[in-house]
Amino acid sequence: MYFYALMMNGIPVGVIGGSGYTGRELSALLGSHGGVDVRFATSESEAGRPSAARGVTLARAEDVRPEDAEVVFLCVPHGEAVPWMERLRGAGVRVVDLTADHRPGSGREDGVVYGLPELVGERIAGAAAVANPGCYPTGMLLALTPLCRAGLIDTSRPVVVNAASGVTGAGRSPRRELLFGEVFGDYRAYGLGNGHRHLLEVRTTLPGLDVLFVPHLLPVARGILETMAVPVPDGAGAADVREAWAGVHAGGPAVRVLDEGVPSLSDVVSTDVLALGAVDNDGLARPTVTVVAALDNLGKGAAGQAVQNMNLMLGFDAGRGLRC
Amino acid sequence: MYFYALMMNGIPVGVIGGSGYTGRELSALLGSHGGVDVRFATSESEAGRPSAARGVTLARAEDVRPEDAEVVFLCVPHGEAVPWMERLRGAGVRVVDLTADHRPGSGREDGVVYGLPELVGERIAGAAAVANPGCYPTGMLLALTPLCRAGLIDTSRPVVVNAASGVTGAGRSPRRELLFGEVFGDYRAYGLGNGHRHLLEVRTTLPGLDVLFVPHLLPVARGILETMAVPVPDGAGAADVREAWAGVHAGGPAVRVLDEGVPSLSDVVSTDVLALGAVDNDGLARPTVTVVAALDNLGKGAAGQAVQNMNLMLGFDAGRGLRC
Amino acid sequence: MYFYALMMNGIPVGVIGGSGYTGRELSALLGSHGGVDVRFATSESEAGRPSAARGVTLARAEDVRPEDAEVVFLCVPHGEAVPWMERLRGAGVRVVDLTADHRPGSGREDGVVYGLPELVGERIAGAAAVANPGCYPTGMLLALTPLCRAGLIDTSRPVVVNAASGVTGAGRSPRRELLFGEVFGDYRAYGLGNGHRHLLEVRTTLPGLDVLFVPHLLPVARGILETMAVPVPDGAGAADVREAWAGVHAGGPAVRVLDEGVPSLSDVVSTDVLALGAVDNDGLARPTVTVVAALDNLGKGAAGQAVQNMNLMLGFDAGRGLRC
Amino acid sequence: MYFYALMMNGIPVGVIGGSGYTGRELSALLGSHGGVDVRFATSESEAGRPSAARGVTLARAEDVRPEDAEVVFLCVPHGEAVPWMERLRGAGVRVVDLTADHRPGSGREDGVVYGLPELVGERIAGAAAVANPGCYPTGMLLALTPLCRAGLIDTSRPVVVNAASGVTGAGRSPRRELLFGEVFGDYRAYGLGNGHRHLLEVRTTLPGLDVLFVPHLLPVARGILETMAVPVPDGAGAADVREAWAGVHAGGPAVRVLDEGVPSLSDVVSTDVLALGAVDNDGLARPTVTVVAALDNLGKGAAGQAVQNMNLMLGFDAGRGLRC
């Protein structure tokens, strides 16, 4: 194996679950990364077909040797990452888990670093296991955490988050409500009642915050736009928000703070960037800033962030292989 | 003319501006209404081509006699309805103005009834002129007014409205940002800063309310979904909201209150119905109900409501000719 | 039952398979037809939920009495209509079968009239059973049969048909390749090799014709556009084609022949009309006319035509209840 | 300036017309190419805004010095390239013209190489001026020329080409028929009568061929799919077609021949690849192969091919900077 790695000139990595939307996006990024060598990408349903990593054929999980990889990515359905995590950590393989199984609030976060590079970058470098954040929480937390730290959120009032996601965010398993004939021309709220799984990550990470989160299904393939009504202290406004962001995000490869206005979905689709914008509002009794976060649910919201985490774990430049 | 009207067995009406999205939708509804006779539909750019009202050819405004109609609909660009209103009222012709020119807050609302049939039905019957409400305000006001009347809104907190509209809401004039190549796969907030023209109607109609309104452009042709975070008094909830709606809207042809859950866009596209739903939220410091209003911007949000107003003005059943 | 029918003032009909795209479209048309009374609409997966026929709740097939209906529509998956047909005909119930099971070439067409009203209208009136044509063949046969009859096709050369259909044409059962995430932004040929099931209907009906048929999956919900390269005899052209069409289709409610140019999909979506246009071509060694047929796969291509057939069977006006 | 070029380590190039769809795509490719330095990208309507080439601001044409570039790309509207070509060639600047102004059949092709790298690669290397092919002809010519050369087309019968293009193919100037509200859910044939401008390129390049070409407007942003009914000699078939393609295209970076089946649009969108597939057909009097060519109209159909041409002109690897 040493000889092979030398030949390939890359650190061996692997993908468990390489045929879903996230697994394919990740495989493609890893395949063109340059610093790593994709040893395997698994799929039970599409074994034998080419993976999205150039030159790598999808194989059944039982036919690959995950222990040969230095880092393994878990792109399995939510709930199925737990046994993989145990097996791989037992074998000394480092793991980036893209499921919700080890995220904050899951009850399984012990010894697992929550992989938001912009907020805890230094901890990721040495992590044996990383829980890759959810797509919606990535936008909310990278927008709101710097504001919390700077005292720019009036916590006596709720933050109202209306979010919209493209359909790939719901996965690639056939379900009637995700058929083209159902989604085309439609737009709907879902996960109502403020109990969406993703909220747990946000609440656990920002415990003092009152958040109302309403996700919507958008008739596009990719992308998330989160529109947040952020209550700010008297006298504060969008300029302060941008300044707080700049303090945390300046210099990072994967977050872009707009000087004015707000980003749109097409600004970030098929990239690994999160774009942030803030605007003041007129005519309200108390000041509220409209914050918009835009990201690709498969990019910075999943595969791009996983690669960014891997870069930190393996000592590469944080932005290597990313579309930024 | 008496003889002709007799033959056609319908009350003579006309459309100024019959080739835009709203003018066409309205012409089609009037053409199949059965109780009226479309005497003319005008268009400067498409004169000579068939209108959407069966059997009626588009004509230049200078070539028609608006005074021959009993009711004339104004589907001209915002700002151009003022001289038409003067001319027609001077001639004793009743007017339904679909522009913003005579709506609450415009400064020109004197002698003009704001045409929300569910809220002021009795006043419309005798009106000489009706200002047809905006598409966004229709959803907001029909959802929120019953709640205000019932004391179900905690006015110490703002109502946060995130709305999304299909592209026909922006009209049919060629603009780069409305090209298919720009909108396809995109989603964006616009009208930021809480100063959207439509807010004026809402604020004037519900003066005690603190509203933050953020509209978005949705990559579909038709339909509006408005997701509202409505602060309610302690102890109140979605069931109370539905009950308040039922008290106002039960029996009307054009508003449907869902027993549970919330409507989606496809429930109402190409209909003249406004659908309303309400859901309670967990995990918030103070109670907030998520209200969703869905309507077709060209249906109940424009042409459908205009026909509903006309029905009341002319003594027809309120729902005649509507897709309810 | 006599008393009930009297009360409802309609002939009793029923739908087997009321929750697929075709079954819902058909139920909606029947529900607003006015001359019939929808006694039942079945669904195994959605029993208990409202059907698309106003006031009718979906029920399991075992819980309805098909024998109570005068006409029953079969909207089951292809292959499942055979036992239904036997049972219903045994009970003296007339049947409109929307599956492929009894169409020309199926081997089961004995005693079943192929329901193309424009071509065999008189035979449908007295039929005990009607095979409702496929969506693609409807366009091809209503365009080409009048030309064959008029000697306007040079049968020494093939007719090349490139067709594109919206996704509802593939049904509502969950399949990965029909997910929104797969179809959005895509366009593809399928059914390659000239062996598409629908060709059988065309070949059996027009045996002398050499047809190359290539269907494509279009990223829209509804509608079929068929672009046909029709070889015509020397000296013949588009004007002759239109004249031949006029001879067959003039006066019918569901076929519209354009005076010039060709129809687009949006001309016919959500209608029960087939639109036909023809254009001459320059620069070819031998004359070929481009014929375009546009129809809604759920309208004239399925449910609309089924209602048209029912109208003939029951003595209603052919166009009653249709969106023409 | 010498020092600057040295610093940038790239050959100076420029783009006239950098804000249209093609100009932006091209600027982005050039900006990440690595071997060239984008000195300017012009736009009259968007001067002062960032171009798609990283670090380059759009400028008015009068404010740039085209003569400083070694290669200039013309992405102006059709008809406006002629004076630019004269001026630049007079100054000794090499030109890649992406308009139709100097393509075969234009009457201005003297001294201009028609830039189809796979067919005339060696001539491009030394060209002072290159006419970048049209998007539709690229697919037709790269598919059909190898077949003509191999005697695989029965020229006594026409080749019938049905093509569909995404909306960016029609440019970024505001026109009503390109509005989202018009195109969404629609699909239509255009350029009827077999007189499309692009045919001229094909006929001039393959004079012996009888081609019927019917383009359609597809409701997607990007991509072209061309479905061709190719008459082949008795005994020939899809396998021969693939073999003929392999002889010409094997080893090239930008054409991919499928071993079986045909490509779909999503296989090539946002790439610079043309994918080709061929399938035999049953049930026809004489053999006809269905050929499908798929490409991105902005990639291999415009900007990608322009970069490929530039690579040959400047001695780079043919595939450098391309998404293949």
Image: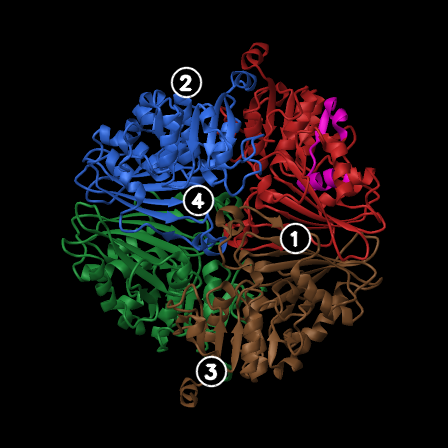
Chain colours: A brown, B red, C blue, D green
Crowd band around label 3 with a 10 angstrom C-alpha radius: few (<14), some (14–19), many (20+): some
Q: In this rendering, which labeled residue sits more in front, label 3 or label 2? A: 3
Q: In this rendering, which labeled residue sits more in front, label 3 or label 1? A: 3
Residue A146 image offset from top left, x and y in percent: 73, 71
Real-space CA distance between mark 3 and mark 2, rounded to the nearest whole angstrom = 75 Å
Q: Residue B190 shows which numbered tag? A: 1
Q: Residue at x 61, y 44 (%)?
A: B264
Residue type beneath disc 1: Tyr
Please state which of residues A89 and C320 is positioned toward the viewer in this rendering.
A89
Quick one: quadrant of the C terminus of chain C? top left
Q: Which residue does the numbered mark 2 point to in the structure image?
A: C315
Q: Residue at x 46, y 56 (%)?
A: C182
Question: To which chain does the residue with label 3 belong?
Answer: A
Real-space CA distance between mark 4 and mark 3, rounded to the nearest whole angstrom = 45 Å
Tell me where the magenta segment starts and ends, as one range.
B120-145
Q: Quadrant of residue B67?
A: top right
Q: Which residue does the numbered mark 4 point to in the structure image?
A: C171
Q: Please name the predominant secondary structure of the magenta segment in the image.
A: helix
Q: Residue A68 shows which numbered tag? A: 3
* Residues behind callouts 4 and 3 on a single chain: no
